[in-house]
Amino acid sequence: MMRLSCYSVNHIITLSSPSLLRRRLRASLSVAGESTMATTNSLRVAAAQMTSINDLASNFTTCSRLVKEAASAGAKLLCFPEAFSFVGAKDGDSVRIAQPLDGPIMDQYCSLARESSIWLSLGGFQEKGSDPQHLFNTHVVVDDTGKIRSTYRKIHLFDVDVPGGRVYKESSFTESGKDVVAVDSPIGRLGLSVCYDLRFPEIYQLLRFQHGAQILLVPAAFTKVTGEAHWEILLRARAIENQCYVIASAQAGIHNDKRESYGDTLIIDPWGTIVGRLPDRLATGIVVADIDLSLVDSVREKMPVAKQRKPFDFWRAASL
């Protein structure tokens, strides 16, 4: 079956231009009697959507094409979804193909970044675990020279009985990470997460308020059922409450007879406005938007929640 490629740069850039973002923010804040002055300081990013399968070579071919499209559009960073390089068809497939970060699979993707001079967010790579039965679900950030700049191992594992769906037990083959990770990049300070982390606001609060994140990356493979119910709502909430951009790259469509992903790759600004979205929720392609860090500064200045929020110790004392 042929997969559609969707790449609507002109449409997306129109939606996500810094001037339009400023007008939207000014209109929103003026309702409360406030005004905002944001200066243009934008850099272009892209988010990829795809339907990965149990074929490393086929997935790499798709990723290579999307990297070239993003680089041609002028993006400085391209974000891939969770399990970009491989989605197993049978239990044990992912553990079987798992490799260390200096192995040949990741080396291919580092070469892609270097050849196209673009930063890559590679969310949900099957990193070899500490024993033969487990892997790490690892978010890898690679710079435009092909160097790995940072890694985050998924903390919250998807052990869930999906209503009307199947039972998932990610912990049966995946080790949980322990560290919250943010990293500097040309487009701003990136806060790293993976998929199911999205349901746990504490990690994003730590990324924003303790690690200085300006852009939250959420590579994911949400199920069709949970995606329809919660995907956009949760993403917009994380953007609003942390006053950060959110880039959420999604797996989409039917991977095999056991697994289907919701799709709907999104880029959201710190006011909670969707500024980038693929016209087709299930298509393979990229969405492009301009990140304006002056908008982040403006939102935070006008609504200074970082100064007003209470520390975690306050709530422990208040609950006694």
Image (cartoon, rainbow, N blue to C red):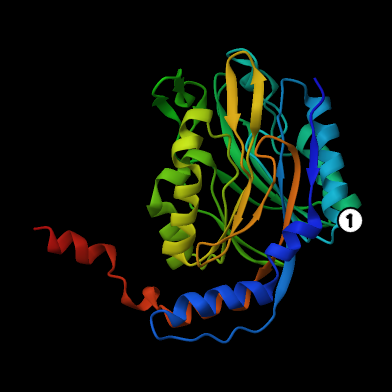
Q: Amino acid at mark 1?
A: Ser
Is the C terminus in the top left, top right, bottom left or bottom right quadrant? bottom left
Number of marks in the image?
1
Residue 269 vs 59, above or below: the answer is: below
Q: Nearer the viewer, residue 29 or 308?
A: 29
Give the percent coordinates (x, y) of residue 315: 20, 62
Q: Quadrant of residue 209?
A: bottom left
Q: Quadrant of residue 254?
A: top right
Q: Nearer the viewer, residue 231 or 319?
A: 231
Residue that extends furthest to the left in the rendered view of this protein? 320
Is the N terminus in the top left, top right, bottom left or bottom right quadrant? top right
Q: Is residue 223 left or right of residue 162?
A: right
Q: Nearer the viewer, residue 28 or 149?
A: 28
Q: Is residue 28 left or right of residue 295?
A: left
Give the percent coordinates (x, y) of residue 263: 61, 37
Q: Residue at x 60, y 15 (%)?
A: 92
Location of mark 1 (residue)? 72
Tell me if residue 210 can be seen: no
